[in-house]
Amino acid sequence: CIIQPRLAMEKNDNNELASKATRDIIYNAAGNALDQILGGAGRGGGNSNEPLFVLDSTMVAKGSYNVRPIFLYPNHHDENQYLACYRDAINKMTSPAGIASFVAEPIAAVTGAEHYNLMPPKDANASSVLVIDVGGLSTSISLVSGDKEVLHSLSFPFGGDTFIDALVSHLIRNFDGFQHEAADRGLSRDGHSPLFSKPTLSDASALQRLYEASTHAIHELSNKTRCDINIPYLTMDLETRQPKHLEFGVARAVVESEVESYIRNSLVPHLESGDIALSPSFPPPTTLSALFSSAIMSALEKTSLTPFGLRAILLVGGGARIPLVRKSLKTATAVLAGDAYANNTDGKRLVMLEGELSEEINVIGAALWGSEGN
């Protein structure tokens, strides 16, 4: 199961409260997953202070399981803060304490890709792997050594949800039932909006329906160049008191333009003013491919490596299935290392996973990493 207790930690300044919130999230999510896989009574009314994972099979009680847990954690620049909270929370759910293992997501991704023989052979002169993990909320770029150690990692707020937010904003601006709200809430015609500012509406139900339809549309646009969005009775015309229905045709190119507008006008200025440095060797990015080029070069510069000193560039994560992400990374790789590298004509150096495996590879890799005795 994939869970994000990090969000609970960010909302609690008190370490004890953060640990408790994290423990509750993990207890319920992991417990319910185990119930589905192994059978059980569910977590309803369960006590997260009781052990969920018990190593001694003779000590297993109702609501606990004889399994050794392996937890993935994001390799953010502040990972030690989160990892310490993960360990504290999870140790209170294991018997004996300390039986849980922890593995960074990029290390798990490499382990999983190796298991499926997706990686080129190891080379003494090119053993490190650059892992690009495009998740829902953020993208992480990590350099993993041949010895499975993370040499450097950076992340920025761009992911699959960026496409959904962009489409929702586009619909709000272009549906005449919401024109007054688009103007009131700073959603301009050119797509500019403050960083981290999700689209909002006074009608929460209408906003929820827009998000549901947009999520489905983004999934559909991963396989098609155009789709239709139909939401009946979305809102009410205040003058005629008649219902208004949204019927909208959306092209993939329109969504991609919205996303690159966000990158150009909001994300890049934010990165340039913050702690995440883009490469000084490149001009400010105006497209996703240029952003990938600059971020990858920044990671390489920090470790004195070149693309040719890498065993592979590995693209994973749910957002890795989005066509613009795949196309942009291929373009970025060609800029940095040439067409032969990007097209894999000189060996399979650019590894972009297909289908559900792109999402599941981290979890599979973590299980394999744990089974190897780590």
Image (cartoon, rainbow, N blue to C red):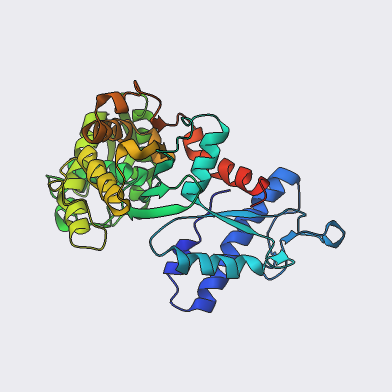
Residue 143 image position (x, y, % from top left): 39, 48
Q: Position of residue 350 (x, y in %)?
A: 37, 31
Compared to 329, does 199 lie above or below? below
Residue 357 appears at what percent x and percent y?
51, 33
58 vs 153, left or right, is right
As displayed, is residue 103 above or below residue 356?
Answer: below
Residue lying at 64% horizontally and 49% vertically, measured from the top left: 370
Q: Which residue is at 47% across, 62% downward?
A: 6
Q: In the figure, 174 relative to 76: above or below?
A: above
At a point 29% along the width and 31% down the height, the residue shown is 330
Q: Quadrant of residue 311?
A: top left
Q: Is residue 360 visible?
A: no
Q: Nearer the viewer, residue 87 or 1?
A: 87
Would residue 210 appear left or right of 29 to someone viewing this image? Answer: left
Counting every numbered tag in the picture gives: 0
Residue sitting at the far front: 124
- Residue in front for this viewpoint, 123 or 337: 123
Res 288 → quadrant: top left
Name the residue at 19% across, 52% down: 268
Residue 73 appears in the figure: yes
Front residue of 60/143: it is 143
- For this orientation, the residue located farthest to the top is 345
Q: Is residue 242 left or right of residue 360?
A: left
- Where's residue 161, x and y in %? 35, 46
